[in-house]
Image (cartoon, rainbow, N blue to C red):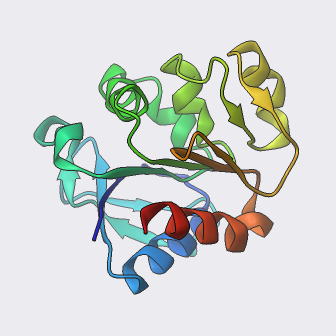
């Protein structure tokens, strides 16, 4: 089963973490949360989810993981201010490891300059940003690109997002 890194901090969109995490864990995968400091507790922007951080970004390497999950909300925008998180995400894209980004999750990939020529989707407010980054934006519930990148737009798309994540990890 896959070991899935999750870059997450305060103000993530609650269900965009809990939905995919639950689907991954139920399928037997290991989900590891990563933030600035292990042991921190981060809270979703709806106040519905609190997540204990498993690992510090300083103590992990992309080579330790099989895939990457990027939940949306304000978390990706806050994380992309820190080059350590950008480099971590970029390493997955460069190595063609599975990357799962929903809603604002692609913001980390924009900053990592890894969307050029890729088919992708995201929340409507980042559509232009994604296009400027060279992505071929599609307004669809889920987009799978090159059997590696899975993107979705919003919480309503979680069932399709989870389906394609699990299909890719089979």
- In the foreground, 69 or 142: 142
What is the number of callouts on the image?
0
Residue 17 visible in rendering: no
Of the pair 66 and 20, the residue shown nearer to us = 66
Whether 61 is drawn above or below 162: the answer is above
Q: Residue furthest bottom?
A: 26
The quarter of the picture where residue 79 lies is: top left
Left or right: 87 in relation to 143? left
Residue 148 visible in the current orientation: yes
Vertical comparison of 82 with 78: above or below: above
Residue drawn 53% across and 16% down? 113
> Toward which corner of the image does residue 56 lie, by quadrant?
top left
Closer to us: 144 or 128: 144
Describe residue 72's horizontal placement relative to residue 100 as left or right: right
Residue 30 locus on image (x, y percent): 28, 70
Query: Residue 31's x, y, as percent?
Result: 32, 66
Quadrant for residue 169, please give it: bottom left
Q: Position of residue 46 (x, y in %)?
A: 64, 66
Q: Position of residue 115 (x, y in %)?
A: 61, 24
Vertically, is 88 above or below 73? above
Quadrant including the N terminus: bottom left
Q: Which residue sits furthest left?
A: 59
| Residue at 32% over, 31% down | 88
Q: Nearer the viewer, residue 42 or 106?
A: 106
């Amino acid at each position: 089963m896959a070991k899935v890194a999750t870059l997450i901090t305060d103000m993530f969109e609650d269900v965009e973490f809990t939905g995919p995490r639950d689907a991954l864990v139920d399928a037997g995968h290991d989900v590891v949360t990563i933030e600035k400091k292990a042991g921190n507790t981060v809270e979703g922007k709806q106040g519905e989810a609190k997540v204990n951080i498993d690992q510090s970004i300083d103590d992990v390497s992309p080579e330790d993981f099989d895939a990457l999950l990027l939940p949306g909300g304000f978390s990706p925008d806050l994380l992309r201010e820190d080059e350590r998180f950008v480099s971590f995400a970029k390493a997955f894209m460069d190595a063609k490891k599975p990357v799962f980004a929903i809603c604002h999750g692609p913001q980390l990939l924009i900053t990592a300059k890894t969307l050029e020529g890729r088919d992708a989707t995201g929340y409507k407010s980042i559509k232009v940003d994604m296009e400027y980054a060279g992505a071929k934006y599609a307004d669809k519930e889920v987009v799978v690109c090159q059997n590696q990148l899975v993107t979705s737009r919003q919480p309503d798309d979680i069932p399709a997002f989870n389906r394609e994540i699990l299909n890719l990890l089979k």
